[in-house]
Image (tube, rainbow, N blue to C red):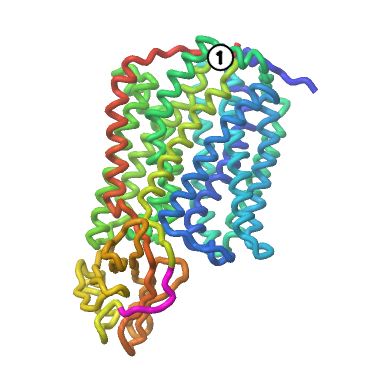
Amino acid sequence: MSYRTTPTETSGMPGGIPFIISNEAAERFSFYGMKAALAIFLANYLGVLGGSNLSESQATSYVSYFNGAVYLTPLLGALIADTFFGKYRTIITLSVVYCLGHLCLAFMGVGGVVQIWLLAGLGLIALGAGGIKPCVSAHVGDQFGKSNQHLLPRIFNIFYFSINAGAVISNLSIPLVLKWYGPHWAFGIPGVLMALATICFWMGRRKFIHVPAQGAPFLNEVFSKEGLIVMGKLMLLFYVFVSMFWCLFDQTATTLVFQAEKMDLNILGIELLPSQIQAFNPFLILVLIPLFTFVIYPKMGALVKLTPLRKIGAGFFLMVLSFAIISWAQEAIDRGETPSVAWQLLAYIIFTTAEILISIVCLEFAYTQAMPKMKSFIMSLFLLSVFVGNAMTGLINDYIRIPESSVEKDHAEFVAPGQRVSDFYASNDKLPTALDISSNGPHGNPISYQLLHAGAARLSSAGPDGKLKTKDDINTNITVKKDERDEEGTWLFEAKKRKGLIAEDDGSGPLKMTHVIGGGTKLEGATYFWFFTGLMAAVAILFIPFSLFYKERTYLQS
């Protein structure tokens, strides 16, 4: 069957757009639903299926590397589409791979196998979700010609709107499915939505403009002088500047979830789950896109020329402000307070505004600045900035993590004989900022007490060489946190390690704890968030001279 290969001369919306938008909404429900559950699953549920739960820092690294892989494979998808198969066939083929990845996650634990299903599922999803991304985005632009090119900014806003319509529903619902019905359903439902997305896209095949693969002409354009200049300018924009935005932004699925666990999650009488806070971002997108499209951009455009680079630069500075708020909230947690999650939601409002100014604008900018035969390829270079940002997050978290080298099986007394667990609490029902511990650790060295937040403290003691918190030394580093109060009013504590409750007081004697060797990070508490805030501030300032010297040129499909 032959398909149309050039845009129709019309001033209205192309006929294939509804199928693309419906596909994108369902596909994004699938991806963000799986991603919303992933960090909590790795930290709290992996052990239920027969694996080993990860620490928060490990889970952050793993999710960052997975998210990075999702934005590395677009390069492969774009090369396949532009050189061999064309965008439509590439999208359909890799969507099937995508569905198989969700199926693998749903089968985790079957037959007592966890790691193989997990790695296979995440690998196939990374290949499928990443491979189709540049093709779908460029496929949207391919539907438009000269007579309706004025609709491009609107359609990319609608496209982004559909992404977040699926994301907001999945971010609210899938964490509840994980809590109530377990990981099989939590990962199975997104798989069903991905199958529906594939069917929806197939149904629009006769409505689409099918720009064929270019083969050798594509390579000639890429390696031409003009093509290399286009790529060089855009790669500087994407990898030096935009990647740092993603380094911070994509921590909404990891470190901000773990921060939310330590905050008051009651909003207007509704108790939220920590992983549900992510839904605030796509919800805000649904509100802010119409506001920017119909109010802010027209009003601001009457006062100053709103170029894409000016929008992106404003987004960078807003990102700095948002992470400063997150850092201030973490400082309150470090002092033993339990701040309202409303502080985190305020940060969400600001960096979601930054997302509109950076991510949506870059989607359109990557399409219009790319030469005609390399649209998907340039889109993949933009998406690769997400990989770079997430890779930075993962590498930083790996570097700062102090690994646990082993776990001692014996018990050691970490409080004075006769001291009760309830004595850990001050009159205001929070852990005290300091605690006098008269006994020593298992190697005869004094025990230090560090308050992490209102419900958790860390007891640490040096190894036999007298050193603490170094990678190659044997150290004792225990985190204790409030678990629940029993009927007699005695507090139970749980060490944050892989084998569950290891410290409790039955009222008959001193507190006993199993001690962990190693653990912790080099950037504790607010220091972690201030570090990323400083990196973003440096990038925002450097972007000013870059934007002043950048020369734009628009290319459209003829």
Q: Nearer the viewer, residue 392 or 14?
A: 392
Disc 1 element: loop
Q: Nearer the viewer, residue 52 or 101?
A: 52
> Measuring 32% from the left and 57% from the top, which residue is drawn there?
470
Which amino acid type corresponds to the residue marked 1 in the rendered image?
A: Phe
**Side of 426 relative to 248 (left or right):** left
Q: Is residue 301 highlighted in magenta?
A: no
Percent position (x, y) of residue 225?
51, 9
Percent position (x, y) of residue 239?
42, 29
Q: Is residue 41 visible?
A: yes
Q: How many marks?
A: 1
> Measuring 39% from the left and 56% from the top, which residue is drawn there?
258
- Compared with 254, 291 (above or below) is above
Residue numbers of the magenta segment: 407-413
> Measuring 44% from the left and 31% from the top, which residue is drawn there?
359
Q: Main secondary structure of the magenta part?
A: strand
Q: Is residue 427 visible?
A: no
Mark 1 crowdedness (10 Å alpha carbons): few <14, some 14-19, many ≥20: few
Q: Which residue is mark 1?
A: 223
The answer to which image quadrant residue 338 occupies is bottom left
The answer to which image quadrant residue 201 occupies is top right
**Side of 423 relative to 486 (left or right):** left
Q: Nearer the viewer, residue 428 or 456?
A: 456
Quadrant occupied by the N terminus: top right
**Side of 290 relative to 90 (left or right):** left
Percent position (x, y) of residue 423?
24, 79
> Measuring 40% from the left and 39% from the top, which residue is drawn there?
247
